[in-house]
Image (tube, rainbow, N blue to C red):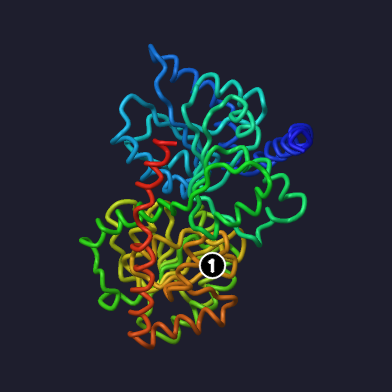
Amino acid sequence: MKIFWLLLYNIIIYPTLFLCTVFISIFYKKVKDSIFGKFRSLYILKKYFSSFDSHPNVYWFHAASLGEFYQVKPVLEGMNKIEGDRQLIVSFSSPSGYKNAYSKAVDLKFYMPFDFPWSVSTALKIVKPKKIIFAAYDYWPNFIWITKTKGIHTNVFAAQFSLKSYKMKIGFRNYYRNIFSSFESIYTNSEKDSNSMRAIIKDKKYPSLQALGNPRYDTVAQKAKRLENKYTENILDREKRIIIGSAHKEDDKILIPSLAHLMDTYPDLKVLYAPHEPSLKEISRIKSHFRDYKYISTVFKKDTDLTLSSDRLIVVGVLGILSELYWQGIIAYVGGGYSTGVHNVMEPAAANLPVLFGPKFQNAYEAEELIIAGGGHSISNGEEFIIKVEHLLKDKNNLKISSLAAKDVIYKNIGSSDKIIWNLMHE
């Protein structure tokens, strides 16, 4: 069966995906940047490793985008402290990761090469990695299958799986079974995820499978510790502001009319609105929608001195600052839950905020944990959004309880980085 998937992937699936991506890149700069980056990756690797007199131990990490890099970061930095003669390199699929990811522990960052057999084989020949480690997802089949034949240890950590996932459906299940059984080790977020993985792999030979948690909790907790000294920790002492983070167009349709209604009802309520892609066109569109409800917004474009003004409505025009802005609000809504799946709910929770999001949150185990604890709330429409926000605004006790519950989810999950590092070094 593996031969079947190998042929299907290399003759039909990946060539079709490649051609579609090249076509789409004509219209989308992010896709174009990724394509050009992948074309240059083998050259970058060859140039970098040709400078070594003897080949070092190389740990190759892969993160799809910036969010996954924040899972990789504490593991990288921990390994950097204990592993001597080594190189830590990180590949990305998305420009948002490649351009914005930073850590002193990273020796080289580059785009993941194309998943054609020849480009994968060339990359592995140049790098000669000791281990290849994927963060959460974005596993490329040829890359995994070829490393398996070369005896290179491949790992995925912070892996999340659900029995309701499309990966469990007939056809998909067999495809993913052949991919996951090719890993040497898999570290999941929870025992529930490990059990789902066992159901996918089924009768295949199991890789080493452990529930070690999500190291991104460590990243946000460390950052929160620094910001606690700068901002008011108790949300009852903060300005009455709702922070909208990483909003998609699908979120806008629900949120903007609802926020206008809430601002009409509560004259002291402020709103900070951060679109997922803060292009000039997006910012202009959002400002126009708010104008329809008679609200004029200012645009926040600073990436230093992040103290917000007293303006009632602020639209964020830069990336990478949301984690700090959350500390200047009392309630957060995180976008993506009406389209591709909810974005990062950890950062607002670490800032002690009750976190609201749309119904598509199954991609984020931490969102499920927040709901169970009472610090997270899924909403299906604008009416539910208004009801939940008013429930928190009208009763300070409700707000405080939800705030503490959100924070507790973060701090009870820290420590996974050390477990992952230990296992990576000893397996």
Identify which residue, 205 or 44, lies in the foreground.
205
In the figure, residue 42 lies in which quadrant? Answer: top right
Q: Position of residue 48 (x, y in %)?
A: 44, 20
The residue under the point 52% across, 19% down is 126
Apparent side of residue 148 relative to residue 4 in the rendered image (left or right): left
Q: Position of residue 203 (x, y in %)?
A: 68, 47
Snapshot quadrant of residue 52: top left
Is residue 271 something that shows in the picture? no
State how many labels appear.
1
Q: Could you say where residue 298 lies in the image, as x and y percent from the top left? A: 40, 65
- Camera-side residue of 94 and 50: 50
Q: Pick the quarter of the image with the N terminus.
A: top right
Specify few, some or many for label 1: CA neighbours under 10 Å numbering under 14, 14-19, or 20 or more.
some
Say which residue label 1 marks: 288
Instruction: Please say whether residue 198 is visible from this viewpoint.
Output: yes
Instruction: Name which residue type carries label 1.
Output: Ser
Identify the residue at image location x=37%, y=39%: 76
Q: Residue at x 43, y 27 (%)?
A: 58
Please, what secondary structure does the residue beneath circle 1 have?
helix
When the figure is inspected, residue 171 is found, relative to residue 231, above or below; the finding is above
Question: Picture coordinates of residue 268 (x, y %)?
Answer: 35, 82
Report the front residue among 87 and 393: 87
Q: Nearer the viewer, residue 386 or 399?
A: 399
Q: Write the residue at 38% across / 43% down.
A: 75
Q: Image check: 321 left or right of 24?
A: left
Quadrant in the picture for the C terminus: top left
Q: Residue furthest left?
A: 229
